[in-house]
Image (cartoon, rainbow, N blue to C red):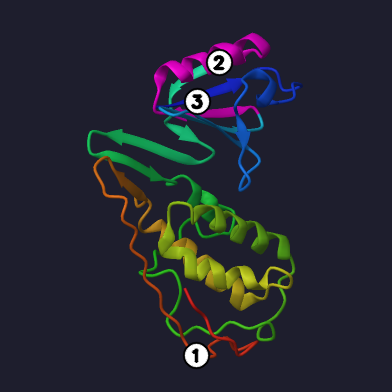
Amino acid sequence: MTVELRALEDNSTWTLEPLSPGFHSSQADNSLFTLTTTTSIVLVLIYVDDILVAGNDLSQIEIFKKILSIHFKTKDLGSLKYFLGLEVARSPTGIFLNQRNMPSTSSDSGQLGAQTAPFPMEQHLKLNNKDGDLLPDPGLYRRLVGRLIYLTITRPDIVYAVNTLSQFMHAPRVPHMTAATRALRYLKGCLGQGIFFPSSNSTHVSAYTDSDWASCPITRRSTTG
C-alpha cells in the first residue's frame, strides 16, 4: 500500500528517528527512510512538504501516520496517484508509471506546434564542442536537458540521447539545441508510454549490454551501456 501525506506547516523540520524509533535514513537517498521488522517494511519518502508512505503492513503505516499527525499538521491524500510529475495508475495486473505531462516543456522551447519525430536522436549523429554557434541563452538548453533527465525515470528509451546531450551543458551550441528539441518532438509522439510493474513477476533480473570502439569524437573513448 502507498499513501501520500502533505504537511500543512512548512516551517517544521522533518526528523523521523525521534518520532518512530527504528527508522533509518537510506545511504543512497537522504530523503528515504525505512523501518524493517521480521514481518514488515515501511518506507517513507520526503520531498519538502510532500510525503509518500509505502509498506506491506497497513497497521504499521497507520501507526506511523498517527505519530506523525501528533507532531505535525498533515493532510492524508489517500492512495498515490500523482507525485512530482509522476502519474501512478493501478490495476489488478500491476502498476503503471508515466510522466505524460512533463514533455509540455515543448512550449518553452518553441516546439509546441512542431511535428513529431520517429526516434529521439538522429542515427550516427556526432555532436562535439566546436561545431555551430554558441547559444545566446545557455540557460534554456540547460533547463530543457534537466527536464529530459528527470523524464528518464519512466522513459528509458531516451536515456542514450539525454546522456549525449548532458555532455554539453557547460557551453551548448546550436546543434546541441537542435538535437534536444528533436528528443522533445519524439516524446510528443508517444506521451502515453511509461514503465509497467506487473503484480506477478519473478525477481530474476535480465541485463543487456553493448559497446562500441572509440566512438566519442571528443575523447576517442568507447561507450558502453
In the rendered image, which residue does mark 1 sit on? 213
Considering the image in quadrants, where does the N terminus appear?
A: top left
Rendering quarter of residue 66? top right
Please report the bounds of the magenta region as a residue range.
49-75
Say whether residue 61 is left or right of residue 195: right
In the rendered image, which residue does mark 3 sit on? 4
Where 55 falls versus 31 (above or below)?
A: above
Tell me the amino acid under the disc marked 2. Lys
- The structure residue drawn at horizontal position 54% and vertical position 38%, both measured from the top left corner, is 84
Secondary structure beneath label 3 = strand
Secondary structure beneath label 1 = loop
- The structure residue drawn at horizontal position 64% and vertical position 12%, both measured from the top left corner, is 73
Residue 133 is labelled as: none
In the rendered image, which residue does mark 2 sit on? 75
Q: Residue 130: x percent and y percent?
A: 69, 86
Do the numbered discs 2 and 1 sit on residues whose CB atoms are within 8 Å?
no
Which of marks 3 and 1 precedes in the sequence?
3
For the residues labelled 3 and 2, the Cα–Cα distance comes to 9 Å
For the residues labelled 1 and 3, the Cα–Cα distance comes to 47 Å
